Amino acid sequence: MKVWEVARKPRVIVGPDTPATIVRALLRDNEEPIAVVVDNEKNMKFQGYVTWREVIQITSHYSNLRAKDVALDWPVAYKEDDLEEVVKRMEEEKVYAVPVLDSKDNPVVVGVVSIADIVRALMAAGYEPIAETVAEVMTTEKLEEYITTQEERVNRVWSDLVYHGKLGKVVVRSKEEPIPVGIISLREFVETGRWFFHRESERGLKTVARVRTIMLRGAPVATPETPIQYAAKIMAENDFPILPVIDEETGKLVGVLTIYDVVRAYLEGAKPGRAKPVKKAALPIEVKPEERVTYATAETVLQQVLVAKPQVEALIGLSAADIARPELPAVTVNDTVEHARRMMLRYRTNYLLVVDEKGEIVGVVSKWSMLRAIGLKGPIWKRRVHDRYFIDYVMDTEIPRVKADDSIEQVALKMTEAKAEVAIVVDDEGRPVGFITKDDLVDAYAKLQAGRAKVENVMTPGRIGIVHPHHSLYHAVKKMQTFYLDALTVYDGSKIIGVVSANRLPFVAYEDAVTGIKSRRLVWVRKLVRGAAKKGRYVKVTPLLVMDATVPLRDVYVKTSDDVVKAIELMREYNVDGIPVVDEEGRVAGVVTKTDIVRELARTARLRIERGETVKIEKKEKPEAKPKAQ
């Protein structure tokens, strides 16, 4: 594979005299690991490039440095280079991303490529990794160099990242008890300035921050038996440069999987002397400090449940044609997100088709995909509601297409694999004849599948589906995106407050007409002198919290032993995408969502496919109604 097959357009282009602090801000706001420095944007003549590592060397709000002062000129990639050669070059020089130039004789920037881009391209092209499991390629040598604690001074980690070429470190509870509680990487340093070493204040220079101040909490983990393909997907989709590898029984760190290790698994195979363990899918889940660590091990993500049960083998008997709706409201690709929001309110729908100038369907916008507009280019509290983001920024373009005689279980499987909210029903010639939404599948389950499964058999278990009301709203949205959840239970440790629901989030008021962007003032009372009474008041302005977007559900929940249909009825009654779950002893166990119910249908299709059985319904007459966009 050549580099030009992987390269993409640069999102940050600057001139040589652009202040380095501006470059840092552009990288942060665009969530981009590299900025290319060019003469001008017309000729794109290469002058250098700046990555996360260079901009975090500016350790305060103030700097006279320009882009040309911190820019690198090597390594670079040329569009005709072999991918393996470029990866080796990047690993030797310890860089995460490089510019792609036309040729040595014509140093014009034609694109950029990061290690994560390479992993995504290999997966999209259908490449199978030569090494199958994490154990075959993970880094175990000098593991102590990849470990830090929450109380470590942030400048020590900064030094390792800047001067020793580390991509990141695993944050553990303690060196004696190396249980992961998060990660810290170059990206965390770029996203906040709370760690700056020199900052003017009324009290002079502040003390150096601790790792806990900027670390990424709740990073996924893997086990040595985790398939490389699954770990690669988690890392590429979320731009995680490292992934903790833990022993499944003790929860302790046994290795670190770097993004370079993942690429090696695809291009070279196992590291010398590594034995191949029995392949077993271990699902990375969220790990939080001071909480009991549990790990769900399953064949696929579809089987992530609290209590397993025998698979349902029989099909419901409904085909795609039986539940397809003939039309959905539509917007054009040139409309704004704000217009789409108004359309959803006008037609009381969770889904909109996106059509181009010729009337061809090019995507779908759902309330789930609207979350991207909320969190686009940074935390949601920094985004204005009226920012004119266009539909192509947030729409889903990967829309599964199904045949009219496909079973709804097969439809559910395709939608689950694509993380899609809508499927298009096509005839034998590939023309659209109807549409199926996630809500249609849930409604079909409710009508015909009472008694099929209990809540404990389909729910999202453990702490993955729970947030505290004082967590930031940005944390909740990122959690929903990472684990593909459409609802979270809001629990304060003593009682259930409600849920954060994907179908309600796009309509939360993040801005006030008078005061502007909303925030919260939190007040702490503290001791002025050790041992004295608490008298000092400490006021802090914070971003919006989970409680600001919570749909209150007082005494509304389902038990793990309840039928799934009961949960669906409550979702309809309160217009939410998920319901809190408690166990038989009254303890909060997680959340059950509409996506969980779609996954339950998908499991049947997956089981039949693995057994070589058909998952189609006998072909029926084509629907008479033709789909049309309103």
Image (cartoon, grey):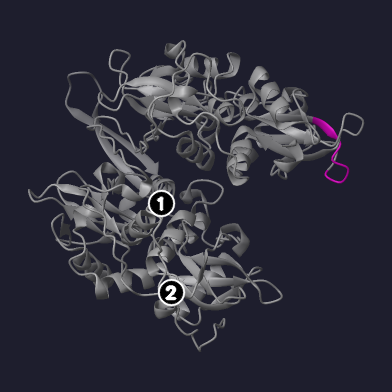
Residue lying at the far left of the rendered structure:
585
Q: Earlier in the sequence, mark 1 or mark 2?
A: 2
Residue 66, label in figure:
none
Residue lying at the far right of the rendered structure:
105
Above or below — where is 300 with respect to 348? above
Closer to the camera, 58 or 323? 323
Measured Cα–Cα span from mark 1 to mark 2: 24 Å
Question: How far across and how far down the image is residue 173, in percent?
Answer: 30, 22
Residue 320, label in figure:
2
Residue lying at the far front of the rendered structure:
612
Name which residue lies at 53% across and 37% down.
239
Question: How far across and how far down the image is residue 295, in percent?
Answer: 28, 35
Residue to which mark 1 is pinned? 484
Mark 2, Cα crowd under 10 Å, few <14 / some 14-19 / many 20+, is many
Magenta stretch prevailing secondary structure:
loop
Q: Which residues are magenta?
A: 41-47
Above or below — where is 317 with respect to 280? below
Residue 209 seen by the camera: no
Assign a secondary structure to mark 2. helix
Question: How far across and how far down the image is residue 42, in percent?
Answer: 87, 46
- Residue 474 sits inside the magenta stretch: no
Dot 1 amino acid type:
Tyr
Residue 110 seen by the camera: yes
In front: label 1 or label 2: 2
Question: How far across and how far down the image is residue 388, in percent?
Answer: 61, 62
Assign a secondary structure to mark 1. loop
Determine whether, in the image, residue 228 is placed left or right of residue 278. right
Closer to the camera, 289 or 452? 452
Name which residue lies at 74% across and 41% down.
13
Where does the N terminus fall, quadrant-wise?
Answer: top right
Above or below — where is 90 with respect to 344? above
Closer to the camera, 289 or 570? 570
